[in-house]
Image (cartoon, helix red, strand yellow):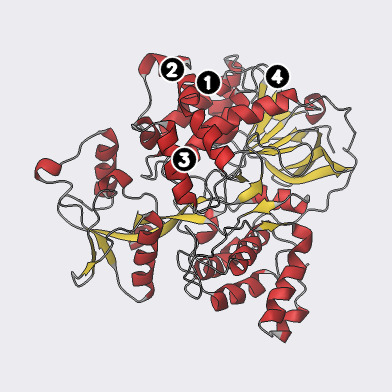
Amino acid sequence: MSEKMDFDWNCKNRARQRKGCGMVAAHTVNLEKLRGQPLIVGAGIAGVLVALHMNDAPCILIAGREPQVTDTGADSLFSLLKETGSPAERAARTLRAGKGLARLDVVQCIMGRMDQALTGLAQFDFIRTHGWPDTESALYAILFGILAKRKNVTIIPATALRQLVLVEGHVRGAVLATGDRIGILDTNVVIMAGSGACGLFGDDLGSSHGTGACMAIAARAGATLCDMEFVRFDPFALSIETTGKTSFAVPPLLWEESVSLLNESGHRLDGTGKDSDGLARLVQQNKDTGHSVFLDLSKQFSGQSVVAGDHLDRFLKQCGNVGLDPRKEALPVKAAAAFHIGGIMADIAGRTSIAGLWACGECASTGLHGASALPGNALLEMIVCSEMVAESVLNESKNMQVDVSMITPDLSVPNGAEGMLRPFVKMALGPVREGASLRQALFRVSRLASCDDAALVAQMMMISACQREESRGAHFRSDFTAEASVALHTELCEKSLAAMVRSIAYNVHDLNTMDLQTH
């Protein structure tokens, strides 16, 4: 099994190898030669940064598809670089947005390291010479280009982690798949750096349209997941029916000071005093009642209020590409999933409830965000925590390797039911949620959760949303509109999910659901 695995890669990357770059782009990868190296799962910004911070230590980075980060209009990098307040002020705003669920020690630590982390990133040759890039995707391209030259990093494309191999509660191996080929890597360290599950909504703003694969694999291995119900929705994603998929949103700097919303009849909608979560709910509630919603930016582009900058020029170009001009017309908008706040429960250095398993980035839940996420904080968390994760891994004592190559994995389906799940996820887990819809979706999704990874993630999100009988931050229940007096986290383990589904069914006297074979 672990002798060799064949990987197809494109000619450009093979050419890089021929030029002598440190990035290994071999057509055939010998897993035996990589035995014992830490495995980083996910080649987005979080994964690339962890690999860069591994210094000269050998490590492996796998990517499920050609890695990329797209520009969605969130302007996370711009939000960080234009920060004028002190770290203490940003920490205070983060705690307010977290609604009692953001961890004070984590917030203080990450905000306290912000300037140092950004300064460290700016020391890379390209950024030091040319300055900061304008977009998150440009930053990613720079970082990945630097990583590709590192001789200590083996980058394996078109490859997915399918299962963790545990021996006596410690990670001892990883089951990897490329196409229909399966191989097992002997390793004591796996770092989950994948995306969240915003891709389950179908019209998300995520760059990878992820379905939470890292979360599902960690859960099946026995890891604890936290606050899976919390998803941040961008209130003003462009609603262009002809494109079939939302690709970008209105940059926050165009609406954070003043919001002017209209319906299809020109009637103004009152968004006064609402934060991003409240605006997302307002937009969704109007859409649910059959109305269209438009964002009027004419004041922002007129007279003394005119704004400028490369990021805004990019937004105008994006609008022009779909036949819109925000300087002359109101933009059709809708709420779209932008960031999965919950995930694999981890400390600030990425350590999870499983020995040998770390988590970093969107798939992790460190306690920074709490019940909502401020613009720029997700990127800041990746930048700061990636260094701490790498440091933690490098300081971990070296354990004797265990040969797990002959183990026969019992694999679930990674995303076989994704298309069927999306209508239930959108119905039950949008900006406005309600108990009956949540339970209906949960009972349907639970039929597949034992064998499908995307269904397992959706099930965990729905169970957590059912349990949270209150409205807090990004989670709003129309049947429980008040915020509870005590802020509590929701924690889940995969082995307890079937019993939790049955308990929910008992509570609503749904006897038919008692017979569901959920696991």
- Single out the mark in the foreground, 3 or 2: 3
Question: Which element is circle 2 on?
Answer: helix
Question: Could you tell me if the residues under marks 1 and 3 are in contact, i.e. CB atoms within 8 Å?
Answer: no
Q: Amino acid at mark 2?
A: Phe
Earlier-in-chain disc, 1 versus 4: 4
Q: Residue 128 appears at what percent x and percent y?
A: 41, 15
Residue ID at (63%, 39%): 158
Taking the image as shown, residue 329 lies to the left or right of residue 502, namely left
Q: Earlier in the sequence, mark 1 or mark 3?
A: 1
Q: Is residue 251 visible?
A: no
Say what secondary structure mark 3 lies in. helix
The span from disc 2 to disc 1 (Cα, nearest Å) is 9 Å
User: Is mark 4 in CB contact (under 8 Å) with mark 2?
Assistant: no
Q: Nearer the viewer, mark 1 or mark 3?
A: 3
- The answer to whether mark 2 and mark 1 are in CB contact below 8 A is yes
Q: Callout 2: few (<14), some (14-19), or many (20+) C-alpha neighbours within 10 Å?
A: some
Secondary structure state at the residue bearing disc 4: loop
Q: Which quarter of the picture shows residue 57? A: top right
Q: Nearer the viewer, residue 57 or 470?
A: 470
Three-letter code for the amino acid on which mark 1 is drawn:
Ile
Distance from the alpha carbon under mark 1 to that under mark 4: 16 Å
Q: Which residue is mark 2?
A: 126
Give the quarter of the image for residue 329. bottom left
Q: Gap between marks 4 and 2, in whole Å?
A: 23 Å
Q: Earlier in the sequence, mark 3 or mark 4?
A: 4
Q: Name the residue tied to disc 1.
A: 146
